[in-house]
Amino acid sequence: MTSAGIICEFDPFHNGHGYLIEKVRNAGAESVVCVMSGDFTQRGAPAMWDKFRRAEAAVLCGADLVLELPAVYAVNSADLFARGGVRILSGLGCVDTLAFGSECADQEKLSLAARVTAEEPEEYSARLKEHLSEGLSYAASCQKALAELYSTEAASVLNGPNDILAVCYMREIILQKAGLSPFAVKRAGADHKAKDPDGRFASAGAIRKAAASGEEIRDLIPEKSLSVISDDDRHPDNKLFYEIARHRILTAGSSFLKDIPEVSEGLEMRIIQSAQCSEDLDSFLENVSTRRYPAPRIRRILSRIILGIDSKKQACLEINRTAYAKVLAFGPAGAKILKTASEKGTVGIVSNVNKYVPKDAAEEISLGIDILSGDIYNMLCGRTLTQYSDRVRIPEIILK
């Protein structure tokens, strides 16, 4: 292992993330490159702190370079989330390992699940379609098919959210022939869904909830991570997030909603009807969510509605295999990685969105969505775009 990549969100950067980077360093990584969700995350919500703050925290806490995962991947399914991250890391031309947290950290089991779901043998594919038709989610359908054809033990790796992402990462390495070696690190401390911390470790969700309630989170986040946050920093207004989504739903109508990825089987009418009668996000999610369409999936759909990510745009990005390295923060070693990537890599290096020339129309669309996501996020935080837009902000350079 020379240079390790991590696909992440750091929402916020907490002790568990520091532990992952430490383990990767101890395993021999000379440099660590992170591809991180921007201002909107894979859970379908705006991040607790903005992407530049989170990227700066990551570099202060052990990363060398933090790049932005384009929003079209970040607010999508685990498959596409992984696809975008692997494309960027492999496209840099200087990263040899993909490291990730895992509940089981059993690479043999993870590899089996990744290989089967990548190759999709005929019998597995038939079982998968059968379970999807029963109304199960994609992840649940995969798990059931694996259990039936292989073993319950093999399917168990799709129980935990980190393991599900791990399988997606390893599958994308196979599908893209990316040349990255997987490196699993056993998750430390509290479970992903745990409400209470386990020693100095707590889940990101628990930390976000505690922070929103005004509880003390200092022991759960590295001091250097907290150092980038100022007292007047504002969290995004979730009420305003819902009002923007609701306005878009009610004014755009069913034809627009039907073009949003993952909106099918009449879901667009359910979304419209719920927007008409739901006064807040919680009640909206309760009215729309089903076993087939769980709340996180609905939240991601809302984010795509707000950002205007329709099926045509997403398909265009897939056809062109869009990937570029939009720089958020770096240290001295990160500067060397960027230089090497500019010489050996196949992805464009974006340090200034005003000066970067997209290589094709798909890349231009994706960058436009990234800039829009930042602008909307800053509006949710009550910030002026003249000061905080991607068009005026530059990467954080950390001389640590």
Image (cartoon, rainbow, N blue to C red):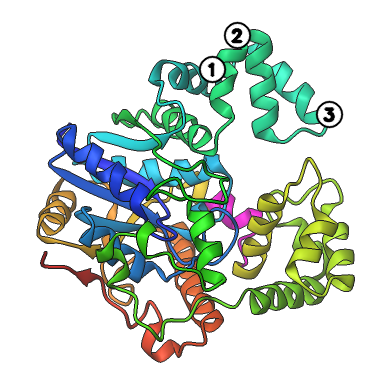
Measured in 3D between alpha carbons, the distance from the residue under mark 1 to the one under mark 2, in whole angstroms, is 10 Å
- Work out how far the residue at label 3 is from the one at label 2, CA to CA, in angstroms: 21 Å
Of the image marks 3 and 2, the number of the one nearer the N terminus = 3
Magenta highlight range? 308-316
The disc at residue 150 is 2
Q: What residue type is labelled 3?
A: Glu
Reading the image, the residue beneath label 3 is: 134
Q: Position of residue 374 (x, y in %)?
A: 46, 74
| Residue 196 left/right relative to 232 | right
Q: What residue type is labelled 1?
A: Val
Name the residue: 55% across, 71% down: 212
- Given contact means CB atoms under 8 Å apart, are the residues at marks 3 and 2 in contact? no
- Considering only order in the chain, which callout, 2 or 1, is on the residue closer to the N terminus? 1
> x, y (%) of residue 94?
18, 41
Under circle 1, the secondary element is helix
Q: Is residue 91 visible?
A: no
SS label for mark 2: loop
Crowd class of label 2 (few under 14; some 14 to 19; many from 20; radius 10 Å):
some
Residues tagged 1 and 2 counted as in contact (Cβ below 8 A): yes
Q: Is residue 68 left or right of residue 336?
A: right
Q: Which mark is residue 116?
A: 1
How many residues crowd around disc 3 within 10 Å: few (fewer than 14), some, or many (20 or more)?
few
Rendered location of residue 116, percent (x, y)? 54, 17
